[in-house]
Image (tube, rainbow, N blue to C red):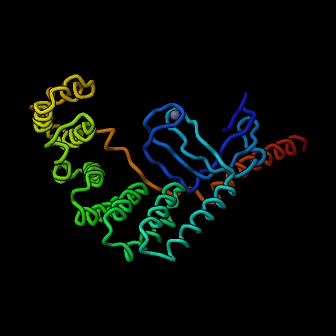
Amino acid sequence: MSFTLNGVGSWYYGRNNVHNFVGQCEFCGASTTLTSYDTTLYFVVIYLAICPLGRKRIINQCASCSKHRLMPLAAYNTFHDTAIDKLLKDYCAATENVEKATELIQATIHFRAAKPFQGVRVLMEQALPHNAPVQSLLGGACEFFGDRSSAETHYHASLSLDPSNTATREDFAVLLLKKGHVDEARQWLSHVLDSPSMDKRGYLYVMIEGLRVAGRHRESLEMLEAYAASLPAIHDDKEFKQYLKKSRRYTNSSKPLRSKLLAAQAASTYEGSPWNRRLPLLITAGIILLTITIIVLGNL
Ligand SMILES: [Zn+2]
């Protein structure tokens, strides 16, 4: 962690290879955006970078409490490259091996290896196009890396092979709701909506969020009431009460409402450049030069 007291201490400057996703913070428990990125830790005086203390990989920095894990960047990259290289070699030796494919996809997600994942995906599209679990996993990974269009393709491929897989149906439905495709999402959540259970009520709520974004409040109320008619116990659920109350308030409206839940995005982005990393030192050098110039001119 960076630390400063009266402007003196250590501070992170620069962000490269940035990955954001929505998850639960391991420190404060908030469900929020967790960010991982490469950065440089500097020794600072009055918040001016004096000297670099090392390149770091920040892991899952919480948008709410700012806490995170970190590793020296070189160690992270070595470990990341070694781990992925080994899994890739193992997979290339047996490209139809589902277990090896699964391990490789999971490793690219774990290390936020967006670029290696693109190559892995091409390999698996050729070797395992008819394997429903692998296609589903590829869909989840594409979504994690912010490629929703490819995620949709893989989920479709998986469900055309095995339409009864409820986990894939649910993941795909949530993706469709994020894209505003409410009716198609409803179709893939039919196993939840037609057979209400307390365990699956989260998918009811995400469906209601989708209807709200589309301004379809009367349908959202009807859906909540139908769910409760088959599962009266849900009336005791605090979230259900809130959803019911809001849907009743907007019953006669078609106003689209924002949904924080559906706005949650997974995207891999690259920010910064070598200039970005050098900027703190350039600013400090500029200030020192300016100070020297003022002193010299003052003595003339
Ligand atoms: Zn937190």
Q: In the rendering, at what x and y percent does residue 73 appear? A: 67, 54
Q: Is 105 displayed left or right of 197 in the figure?
A: right
Closest to the observer: 32 or 137? 137
Q: In the rendering, at what x and y percent does residue 156 appear? A: 26, 63
Residue at horizontal 11 percent and vertical 39 percent from the top = 219
**In the rendered view, would you say 43 is above or below 97?**
above
Residue at horizontal 27 percent and vertical 49 percent from the top = 170
Closest to the observer: 271 or 158? 158
Residue at horizontal 27 percent and vertical 66 percent from the top = 157
Closest to the observer: 55 or 134? 134
**In the rendered view, would you say 133 is above or below 57?**
below
Q: Is 246 displayed left or right of 263 in the figure?
A: left
Residue at horizontal 80 percent and vertical 49 percent from the top = 289
Q: In the rendering, at what x and y percent does residue 126 appear? A: 38, 77
Q: Is 236 displayed left or right of 50 in the figure?
A: left
Closest to the observer: 268 or 81? 81
Q: In the rendering, at what x and y percent does residue 252 appear? A: 9, 32
| Residue 131 position by quadrant | bottom left
Q: How many marks?
A: 0
| Residue 161 position by quadrant | bottom left
- Quadrant where the C terminus lies? top right
